[in-house]
Image (cartoon, coloured by chain):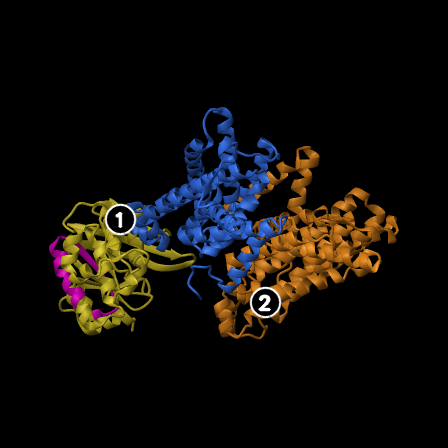
Chain colours: A yellow, B orange, C blue
Amino acid sequence: MTLLEVDALDAFYGDFQALFGLTITVDAGETVALIGANGAGKTTFLKCLVGLIESKRGAIRFAGEPIDREPAERISRLGLSLVPEGRLLFASLTVEENLTMGALNRRPGSWTLPRVYDLFPVLSERRRQMPNALSGGQQHMVAIGRALMSNPRLLLCDEISLGLAPLVIDQIYASFARIRAEGASIVLVEQDVKRAAGAADRVYCLLKGRVTLQGPARGLALDTLSRAYFGA
Amino acid sequence: MTRTGRMLLGAAGVAAAAGPWWLGDGPMRFLSELFLMLAMAQMWNLLAGYAGLVSMGQQVFVGLGAYCLFATSIALNVAPFWVLPVAPLFCAGVAAVVALFLFRLREAYFAIGTWVFSEVVSLLVSKSERLGGERGMGLPTAKLIDPRWLEPLTFWLSAAIAAGAIAGTYALLRSRVGLGLMTVRDNDLAAASIGVDVWRCRFVAFVLAAAGCGLAGAVSFAATLYAAPSLAFDPNWVVVMMFAVLIGGIGTLEGPIVGVVIYFALRELVTVVFNLSAGWYLVGLGLAAIGVMLFEPAGLWPLVRKRLGGDWLSVQRQPPPADTAAGATGDRTATAAYDRTGVRSP
Amino acid sequence: MIWIETIVNGVLYGGLYGLLGVGLALIVGVMRVVNLSHGEFIVLSAFIGVSLAHVLPGVHPLVLLAPVAVIAFALGFGLQAVLVNRVVTRPDPFASILLTFGVAVVMRNLMVEIFGADPRNLPAGRLAHASTTIAGLQVGVLPILILVVSIALFTLLQLLIMRTRFGRIVRATADNRDVVRLMGVNPGRVYNVVMGLALALASVAGMLLAIRSSFTPYSGVERLLVSFEVVVLGGLGTFWGAMIGGIALGVAELVGLRFDPNSGPLYAHLLFLVVVLMRPNGLFGARS
């Protein structure tokens, strides 16, 4: 079953067009990697999905419902959750308060505070601390936990390996198996091609706002990929 | 400036010079008031629109200018207009000293700091018996001027001050300091990083604006022959400056002119045509401000200019004509910094 | 002894100043908007209080605090929903300043037209002049009551913001108004409630101030200036800072009046300038 259906999506920042006719689908239970260099339009695409960019054209359907004209606060209630680039935790809320913010829209499901602490035990120890006191990896865990607390059907992760040590990235990627087991689909936006392709079922490659490559993650030839990535 | 522009300007100058012979007393007094308000609004525009300094205490210089002129004229027993230069000089001096302190405050803090400074000066003047305390003081030395010439002199001075405020601001903005000011307003960190002396640019603008308001205030109160703290340091001075600038279009030289004309037109319409109490024109002014902010936040002048086209009083610099394509893109990024000042129609 | 009494009265009075400013601190902290009509709303609440007292002559003005606060909440909610939310997201700080300034001018002059420009006050009967002796000090009952009300409201506000679900949403919205939308929160609605709360608090202060001293439609400017000083002294956006700032201003004003009877708020202003010049981020703001 198709969970997310994006058809011919254009997006604009003022006069500048950032996305050109993107057509992307995500099936239920699937993990899709979205790769591309800086400025390819990956983050813009995610912001379009969650409703943070209003000047856009094209159709976005989520679980069969058109959401391209819906405001962000309503889209989140449908089960679309974003782990934003740079984490964007609430600096004046404690770790636990940050996590409970995710549960505000009261979507039923299996993710609760104890389950999130079970997934990332270190957060349980630091629940009373402010996010700025945490390491970068732990902050990412809070951001993922916050998104999970809304029991999303589709979890969007924007550059979650950026600036982290490889060991910490391994830890975070290891949590995706659990998240998928609970039934969520995942979209991973990454610059690290190998890492993303390793975790995903399918890959889309973006270049300058257009899809230049799509296909199964397994057996992806490195030279086709690099052509799609760099546009060489 | 074009030939027609120069001719229009010359005609306006002649009309103003001959004003006392063809204008009645009422219109002349009205225009004097308008010109002085225009000069003050332009000063506030220089501060907020170009130097990024939102002063809510600019009335302090209006009042200080007036009191300085009164005190000097009485002490030396000479006609007030002969010692007029002391007002702007004194205000510039005061501004230079308080800038050393107030410039430590940023944005909202600066605005409130200037306002409190103004209140303090007003209270101190109210307590000073030499300056007449709360009752205020008259200007007996005005007797030294032939009464027939008092109003024409005020009119000429007001017109000259308004013209000087506009021309002076224009010249300042075309100078190196002006270029620095605009980079400071848009991003003071970036300006500092390319070697602009942020503090000095702001200092120059603050001191000049104080001098301008002091001069206008001195003439304004000399014309009424009476100054009291509640009138001279009335926050309404800065209220009107702010309204005129923001409604007309902040960060443009024409904006304050449009704003001041709207202000006086509204006042006359409500008080003279509809014969309502003064409160209603202020209500109208407030509604105008709300409307402008909701629907045309850049102010009215940019809207008008889009219709009319042309350069007007743009302080935008032109790139050297011999530039290549690479130079042209460089210029685009450079001029992007003064979008609010002089955008020409594309 | 007279000096201690003056200082005690300054502290009691300063609690009221803190209450005037805390609403403004809340708005600045949560939505980075400077509400220039804050003073006019304070005066309007006092006029509403006087009108209610006129309609209900038997009711003590302190009882009227509740209905006036509710009305002020509704006015603030409406102001935000109808006007301020339209400009709050603009990057230009002038937008909200000029908008609320326009509101202030309209309100001030409408109040002159409706209520007249004569000084009014809220009659509180014996309470206004009653005093009691504590540890040999002569202290007014009203000032004590004012301080108690101020501290109670400050504590309630602190609990609301730090301990409740709503407070969590308010703090999160202040941190990042886009990210809360991803959690299903509409920032505009949060702002409506915050503005309502701010003006409700200010209305209580406005009523108490109207018992203590007279006011006119033009008093809003002074009220705004005091509120600003309180906010800046305390450091933008901190509640207890606002309380301490208010008390500092109250003490400075009363001590100043004691040895210089016609100084008005001169010494409070001077204190403000000195403190702010020494610590440009306020008493409790981080040093930059």
Q: Nearer the viewer, residue A158 or C285?
A: C285
* Residue C206 place in picture, x, y as percent: 49, 40
Q: Is residue B34 above or below residue B109?
A: above
- Name the quarter where the C terminus of chain C is drawn: bottom left
How far across and how far down the image is residue A181, in percent?
Answer: 11, 56
Q: Magenta residues?
A: A171-193
Total marks placed: 2
Q: Is residue B74 above or below residue B320?
A: above
Per the image, label 1 sits on a secondary structure element best described as: helix
Name the spot of residue B137 as percent of width and height, x first: 76, 49
Question: Is residue C61 left or right of B230 when viewed as pictured?
Answer: left
Which amino acid, mark 2?
A: Leu
Magenta stretch holds residue A163: no
Q: Quadrant of residue C221?
A: top right
| Mark 1–mark 2 distance (CA, rounded to whole Å) | 51 Å
User: Along the line of sight, which residue is nearer the eye, A87 or A44?
Assistant: A87
* Label 1: how many Cα within 10 Å (few below 14, some 14–19, many 20+): many
Residue lying at the far front of the rendered structure: C136
What amino acid type is highlighted by mark number 1?
Ser
Image height of C30 relative to B105, above or below: above
Q: Chain of mark 1?
A: A
Where residue A171 sits: x, y (%)? 16, 67
Q: Residue at x 13, y 67 (%)?
A: A218
Q: Is residue A178 magenta?
A: yes
* Position of residue B272 in the picture relative to residue B101 (left or right): right
Q: Which residue is mark 1?
A: A76
Q: Which residue is mark 2?
A: B100
